[in-house]
Image (cartoon, helix red, strand yellow):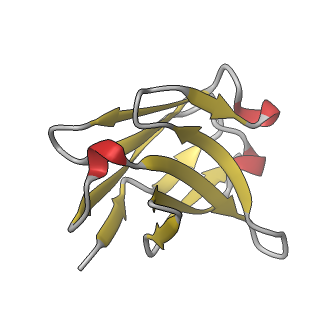
Amino acid sequence: QVQLVESGGGLVQAGGSLRLSCATSGISFGLSTMYWYRQAPGKQRELVASITNYGSTNYIDSVKGRFTIFRDNVKNTVYLQMNSLKLEDTAVYHCKLRNSARDYWGQGTQVTVSS
């Protein structure tokens, strides 16, 4: 059974930092592409960042230079380091794993940025 468990969300002041984690099990993490999505209240879910199995990364423009996605293939975990957080970063953050054209999602973790 494939499982993805996010953690690390919380309440932080604008300008602060958080590190999200997504621990996976039940699948070949090292062969999988990993994604972080977010969904703010009343908005569609959007792709924030991705990292391939060989470490190539992509980011949406609004987080470039502030967020970093990275992975630990020994711990089967993907991370999202979020710095210089803004009010508009407030959302539920979900990780997704893609392997053999199938997608698996975590339950999400809430990130709230306050002024």
Q: Position of residue 113 (x, y in %)?
A: 63, 50
45 with respect to 101 (left or right): right
Residue at x-position 65% and y-position 59%? 38
The vertical placement of 113 against 69, above or below, is below
Q: Quadrant of the N terminus?
A: bottom left
Residue at 37 percent across and 53 percent down: it is 8
- 23 relative to 18 in the view: left or right: left
Q: Nearer the viewer, residue 66 or 47?
A: 47
Find the residue positioned furthest to the front. 100
* Foreground pick, 60 / 62: 60
- Residue 40 figure quarter: bottom right
Compared to residue 102, the image places residue 34 above or below, namely above
Q: Position of residue 56 (x, y in %)?
A: 52, 26
**Which residue sits furthest top?**
65
Please provide percent x and percent y for residue 96.
50, 61
Q: How many marks are shown on the rendered structure?
A: 0
Q: Is residue 21 left or right of residue 15?
A: left
Q: Is residue 65 left or right of residue 8?
A: right
Q: In percent of the image, x 45 and y 61: which residue is there?
A: 100
Q: Is residue 31 above or below residue 111?
A: above
- Vertical placement of 8 versus 85: above or below? below
In the image as oriented, which residue stretches furthest toward the left? 74
Q: Locate residue 26, reporting x and y percent.
A: 21, 68
Work out whether residue 103 or residue 92 is closer to the camera in this orientation and state it.
103
- The structure residue drawn at horizontal position 63% and vertical position 25%, both measured from the top left corner, is 66
Quarter of the image holding residue 59? top right
